[in-house]
Image (cartoon, helix red, strand yellow):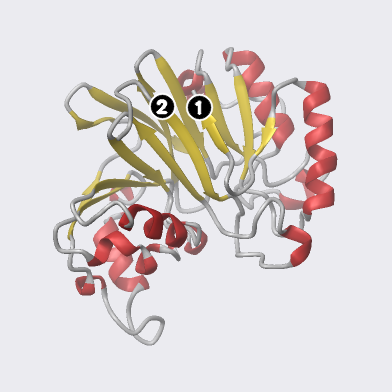
Amino acid sequence: MSEKNDFSVRFWGVRGSIPCPESSHSRYGGNTSCVEVKCGDRHFIFDAGTGIRSLGHNICCGGDHQQVDVFFSHTHHDHIMGMPFFGPNFFPKNKVRLWAGHLLDQGSNLHEILCRYMAEPLFPVPPKIFSANVTFHDFHAGEILEPYPGLKIRTTPLNHPNGATAYRLDYDGRSLCYVTDTEHVPGRPDRQILELIAGADCMIYDSSYTDEEFPRFKDWGHSTWQEGVRLCDLAGVKQLVAFHHDPCHDDSFLDAQAEKAESMRPGTVFAHEGLVLNL
C-alpha cells in the first residue's frame, strides 16, 4: 500500500521511434515510451509504448480490482504499440481510462485511432476484445484535467507532426512535467512549454538528438537534451530527465552525452529502464 504522500516515477520504456533489442542498447533499454507515476494510491501511466507490457504484468500482480489512467502524448505507433498487450485491459473488474489531447482538432478521437490500429490486416483482434471497463477521454491540449477530485493535470500542445500533448502533474506540493515529442526552434524557447514547466521539480523531456545532430533532422518533430537544459534554466526547473532516446544512440553514446549534461547542468539524468525517481 502506498503512503498517502508518495510521489514516484518509474521508467518502463525510454526509446523513441522503434524498439531496440540490441545488446549495445541493453543498459538504457530498448522499449519505447512508457512512464509510470504513482501519487499515493493513484496510478498514472504516460504513453503506451512497448514498455507498458512489463508494467501491465507488474500491475496485474496486485490483483484484478485496479484503476489505471493512461495519458497519451500522441498516437504515433511507438507510443501506442504496447496497448494491445497491456494486461490490465483483460480483467473484467479493472477500470482503465485512456486520455488524449491532440485528436479532436483533427476531427478524430482516441477510440477511432485504436480501432484503426487494432484492425485487420494489421492486428487480428479489435479493442472490443478488452474485458476490463476501458473508457476513452478526449480533450483539447491546453485544458486542465481533473482525473480525481482535487488532483489536477495541466496540459499544453506540442510542436510535433499530427500534434502532441505535454502534461504537468502537481501533487502534495511537488510537480512533474512530461514533455515529449516536440521540436524546438533554435533561439526561440517554446513559451507554452515554459509556462507549463515553470518552477517544476522535474521535467522529462524529448532528447532524441544532440544540438550537433539537430539540423539534420529538421521537421522530424523532436528536440535535444541541450534544449532541455536551456528550458529548465529559463523556467527554474530543478531536475531534467533526458528521454525518448534515438534508436541510433547506443549505451556508449548515451553515457558520453550524460557526462556532458552533468557538466552543463549537474543533476541531469538520462533515463533508463528501471530508473525510479522519488519526488
Q: For this view, does 216 lie left or right of residue 151?
A: right
Q: For this view, does 250 lie left or right of residue 116?
A: right
Q: Is residue 109 above or below residue 36?
A: below
- The part of the image, by quadrant, that contains residue 207 is top right
Q: Dot 1 surroundings within 10 Å: few (below 14), some, or many (20 or more)?
A: few
> Of 150 and 105, which appears nearest the observer?
150
What's the distance in space between the residues labelled 2 and 1, CA to CA?
6 Å
Is label 2 in contact with label 1 (beta carbons under 8 Å)? yes
Q: Earlier in the sequence, mark 2 or mark 1?
A: 2
Residue 135 position in % (x across, y down): 18, 54
How many numbered tags mark residues here? 2
Reading the image, the residue beneath label 2 is 7
Residue sitting at x 16%, y 26%: 149
Q: Dot 2 surroundings within 10 Å: few (below 14), some, or many (20 or more)?
A: many
- Name the kind of residue labelled 2 in the image: Phe
- Name the kind of residue labelled 1 in the image: Asn
Q: For this view, does 163 lie left or right of residue 231?
A: left
